[in-house]
Amino acid sequence: MLKHLVIEKCQDVKSIQIHNSNIVSLRISEVENLILINVPKLTEVVVIEQICNNWSRVFSQLSCCLSQLEKFSLVTVFPQELMKDSEFPELSKLKFLRMNVGAWKDHSLMVLTSMIKACPCLERFVLQLCRMGILQTNRETEGGAECTHKYLKSDRVFWILWPY
């Protein structure tokens, strides 16, 4: 009985359909068209989209399970692309959110605030920043966003410095 599924390095595959009522966790990477059918136990998803210009597509493919997710991890180089097309969908049962994102020069990570706000039951938030370029400080700092959670118990921020 399959409970955990990992789909990675399938760049030439155009579409993947998953029909499994026992699957609990899913890790997908660079999947162009994902179709989920009858996944009532799916509570943990990891999405790896290094360069994605259409996050609306990614979230619409997960729409059948977003309301039941408890753990969600997102890996992307350009977090600013997340909010270009649409609002981040509400994840009403999400307790754990991990973001692995690239920090390019002085790009703002304020877009992540909308993602956190979309998770009203969030208990744990982990932000892993990968610095991808020289930090620029020749602009004014944006004000911080007010974002409180009554359930948030811990938050962690990690820096990984990639040499350039």
Image: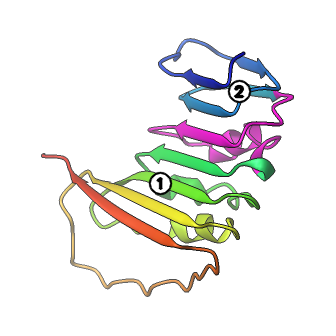
User: Quick one: 139 or 66, which is closer to the camera?
Assistant: 66
Question: Residue at 53% across / 28% down in the picture?
Answer: 30
Look at the image and say whether residue 44 sits in the magenta stretch: yes
- Residue 89 placement: quadrant: bottom right
Residue 109: in sight, yes or no?
Answer: no
Q: Amino acid at mark 2?
A: Leu
* Residue at the image point whose x is 67% and y is 65% from the top: 119
127 is higher (above) or lower (below) than 65? below
Residue at which label 1 appears: 99
For the question of whether residue 39 can be seen, the reply is yes
Query: For this view, does 17 lie left or right of residue 4?
Result: right
Residue furthest to the front? 1
Q: Nearer the viewer, residue 146 or 93?
A: 93
Residue at (75% x, 61% y) in the render: 90
User: Which mark is in front, 1 or 2?
Assistant: 1
141 displayed left or right of 17: left
Residue lying farthest right? 38
Tell me residue 162's x, y (percent).
Answer: 19, 47
Taking 53 as reference, is 69 left or right? right
Nearest the viewer among 143 and 96 is 96
**Residue at numbered disc 2:** 34
The magenta stretch spans which residues?
37-66
- Count residues near mark 1 (Cα–Cα under 10 Å), then give few for <14, some for 14-19, many for 20+: many
Residue 37 image point, x, y percent: 84, 27
Location of the N terminus by quadrant is top right
- Contact? badges 1 and 2 (CB < 8 Å): no
Q: Give residue 73's position: percent from left, percent from top.
A: 54, 47
Q: Residue 106 location in percent, x, y?
A: 30, 67
